[in-house]
Image: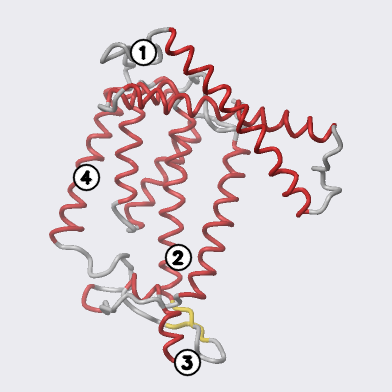
Amino acid sequence: MNNKLVINYIPGPTVLHKLTGFTKVLLFLVMTVAIIATYDIRILIPLLIINIIEIISMKPNYKPICTMFLITFVTVTLLGNVMLFIVSPDAGLNNVGANNVIWTSANGKFYLSKEFLWYMLAVFIKRTTSFASVMAFALATTPSEFASGLNKCGLPYKICTIVSLAYRTIPDIANDFINIRNSMMMRGVELSKKASVGKRLKNTVLILVPLIFTSFGKVSSIANAMDLRGYGKNKKRTWYAEHEQTKWDPVIRTLTVMLAVAAVYYIIRYRIIDPWPVNIWCPWLSRDEIVQTEKELFILNWFKKQ
């Protein structure tokens, strides 16, 4: 499917596409809880593999996915790790529990440890797993299925409708932005690469005003149409997108329940009853070798020394 925005508006032909909205939403919610619950890569890597298999099975257009991942990797991972190293190079000590230094700056103010690299790897895997989970859900679910699934989970249908409409307006806003930009360029406003970056940014801001007014106009039209059709009169409603269960729905729901039970057991056992002394498990450190430290930003300590 040639989907430039990743979001699907027509159900696809694969097994995951044909699942009911409730099954997809339930799987996504449980997967999200499981990812949030831990930084342990022994758990995150299997979850990442599952999400990658889901994405590959749907045979999507990989270009927008790769573009979004690259932007996220550069802005969040690379820049974030550089800033973290500048502000707090002892993040490995605070989060992993040891400090085996492998490099030190000439003035001794900055250093790099194996635990810091492991901390960056664990955070990167966690973010990548979250990204893959969101992509798999977005590729498999239409806005109407998302709304119906949320409603089946107990969310009021009015809020679910707002979510569905928000998804559906994304391509309309993108098209309006392109049309307004082309109109302004035809009137002599320079938005091409010939202009400087500052001038292009300034002229791009001018697009926001007509774009906002156009969006508000569409919102008013949708609200009036819903009022004229009696939307919100009844306490419940049916969903056109919620179809009968397929033979795979009970299987996926059973696996989802098993994952939910495993996540709850992990949270109770390893986060409440007997938590690991620090945030991140490390393969070369035993519990007895972990150093307990007070978590304070390195940059604050650096200023104290001046």
Whole-percent x, y for residue 26 in the image:
30, 31
Mark 4 or mark 1: which is in front?
Answer: 1
- The residue depicted at 59 percent of the width and 50 percent of the height is 70
Sequence-wise, the earlier of marks 2 and 3 is: 2
Q: CB atoms at circles 2 and 1 under 8 Å apart? A: no
Mark 1 or mark 3: which is in front?
Answer: 3
The residue tagged 3 is 306
Q: CB atoms at circles 1 and 3 under 8 Å apart? A: no
For the image shown, how many numbered marks are present on the structure? 4
Near mark 3 (Cα within 10 A), the count class, few <14, some 14-19 or many ≥20, is: few
The residue tagged 1 is 243
- The residue depicted at 48 percent of the width and 29 percent of the height is 166
Sequence-wise, the earlier of marks 1 and 3 is: 1
| Marker disc for residue 120 | 2
Q: Which one is in front, 144 or 77?
A: 144
The residue tagged 4 is 262
Give the SS element for disc 2. helix
- The residue depicted at 43 percent of the width and 75 percent of the height is 114
Q: Which one is in front, 192 or 188?
A: 188
